[in-house]
Structures are given as C-alpha cells and as structure tokens.
Image (cartoon, helix red, strand yellow):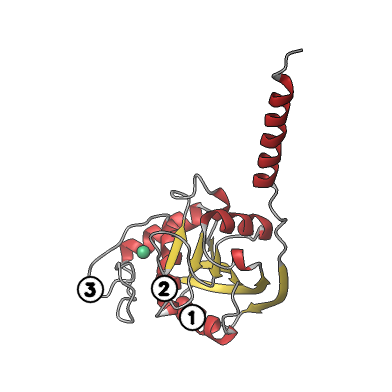
C-alpha cells in the first residue's frame, strides 16, 4: 500500500459523483390531458392515399387554430389525392424544458410518447441554431436522432400555419429537404399564402415515398 492510494480513491469517488450528477436526469413526466379525433377535414374529389396524423399540442395553442391549420393542410395535400382520414389531437403537458424544439429534449419527448408517425408537434418555440419557424425530420436526416424520424415541429409565432404544416409534411412524405423556387409552389423556401401548389412530379414522389415508408395507405 502506498501513500498515494487514499488520494486516488478520493479522485475516483469525486469522478463517480460527477458522472452520477451528469447522467441522473429527472425522469420525464408527461401528462396527456385531452385527446380528440378530428375527422371532418376536407377530402379531395378522388382519394388515392390516406394519411393519419398524430398532432401534439405542447404549449396551449388554441385548439381552433390547430383545427383551422389542419383543414388548410388537408386541402393542400388533397391536390395529390391524399385524404387526411383522421388527426388525433393530444394535449400534452410537459416540463418547460421540453416544450420547445430542442434535439436532445425533443428526442426524449418523442421516445416517451412513442406515437405512430407522422406526428406534428405544436411547440412553444425552437432552441435550435439556426432557429427555424418549422422543421421536418424525415428518414434521411434522422440517423443520429431516430426518435424524430417522420416528425414535424412547429414553433409558436409561425405564420400561414396550414401552409407551413403542409410544406413540412411534404418534406417528411418525400423524405427530402429539397425546395422548388417555381412560382406558387408549396415547396418554395418561403411559405406564403400564394405558395400552395404541388406539381404532378412532386405528388408522384410524395405518394410513392410516403407509401414505401408506411406513412400513406393506398385507397382502392
Ligand atoms: Zn422546407
């Protein structure tokens, strides 16, 4: 035994304490206060695909605002023959730390909720840098954050909400971050009330990829 051993023990004890305090997260407690199934969304003249959405209200967004946004989203996606057959709205009370979009915390939240996808989260804001009003995570950009695959995150204050949700869902369904600068296109970088159109090629890609990834169901 040498005189240095007690010091080594002390260092080891301090290190263990530090590791414990870093890894000892508070368990994430979520409270689902209210569930509602929205079924009265506008349907396209001819439906070829059906889409079911899970919608999470994380920050007391007025339900009427979410409802109105989803109506407009359903109208836009209807161009591709997609009908939003149902949208399950969940009112979730989460700790303040988990109400914003913030990759590590949003991963915890998504893991805990374990919702079928695609899922749209109406958040208090974003803590990501750069900060976007809305983000879509498909398969291609979720390798390091698998819990977030096929999710959309909307920050409070986003304008043209229905168009934003449709734009982000189109990213998810196409599994692509591409934009299209042609006039009036939904996938323009900027979401404006004028940008609502999808081309036949975009619909084709959206339907094929969405179906392959199990996010859309074919309707006979
Ligand atoms: Zn985009």
- Residue 51 visible (yes or no): no
Pointer 1 or 2: first along the chain: 1
Pointer 1 or 3: first along the chain: 1
Residue occupying the point 54% across, 71% down: 123
Question: What residue is shown with label 1?
Answer: 69
Q: Secondary structure at mark 2?
A: helix
Q: Is residue 23 positioned above or below 154 on the image?
A: above
Question: Ligand 1, what quadrant?
Answer: bottom left
Q: CA distance from mark 1 to mark 2?
A: 9 Å
Q: Position of residue 178 (x, y in %)?
A: 32, 57
Residue occupying the point 66% across, 67% down: 95
Q: Position of residue 9 (x, y in %)?
A: 73, 26
Q: Secondary structure at mark 3?
A: loop
In the image, 103 versus 117, the foreground residue is 103
Q: Are marks 2 and 3 in contact (CB under 8 Å)?
A: no
Q: Residue 219 vs residue 109: left or right?
A: left
Q: Which numbered disc, 2 or 3, marks the residue closer to the eye?
A: 2
Would you say the beta carbon of the disc 3 residue lies within 8 angstroms of ligand 1? no
Q: CA distance from mark 1 to mark 3?
A: 22 Å
Question: What residue is shown with label 2?
Answer: 164
**Which numbered marker is on residue 183?**
3
Q: The C terminus lies in which quarter of the figure?
A: bottom right
């Amino acid at each position: 035994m040498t005189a240095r051993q007690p010091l080594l023990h002390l260092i080891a004890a301090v290190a263990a304490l530090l590791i414990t305090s870093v890894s000892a997260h508070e368990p994430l407690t979520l409270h689902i206060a209210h569930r509602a199934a929205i079924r009265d969304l506008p349907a396209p003249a001819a439906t070829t695909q059906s889409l079911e959405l899970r919608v999470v209200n994380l920050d007391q967004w007025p339900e009427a605002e979410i409802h109105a946004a989803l109506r407009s989203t359903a109208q836009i996606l209807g161009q591709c023959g997609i009908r939003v057959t149902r949208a399950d709205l969940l009112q979730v009370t989460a700790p303040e730390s988990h109400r914003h979009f913030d990759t590590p915390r949003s991963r915890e939240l998504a893991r805990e909720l374990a919702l079928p996808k695609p899922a749209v989260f109406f958040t208090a804001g974003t803590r990501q840098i750069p900060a976007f009003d809305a983000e879509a995570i498909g398969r291609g950009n979720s390798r390091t954050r698998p819990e977030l695959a096929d999710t959309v995150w909307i920050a409070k204050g986003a304008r043209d909400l229905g168009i934003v949700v449709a734009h982000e869902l189109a990213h998810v369904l196409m599994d692509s971050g591409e934009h299209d600068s042609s006039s009036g296109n939904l996938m323009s970088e900027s979401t404006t009330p004028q940008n609502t159109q999808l081309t036949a090629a975009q619909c084709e890609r959206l339907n094929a990829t969405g179906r392959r990834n199990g996010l859309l169901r074919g309707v006979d």
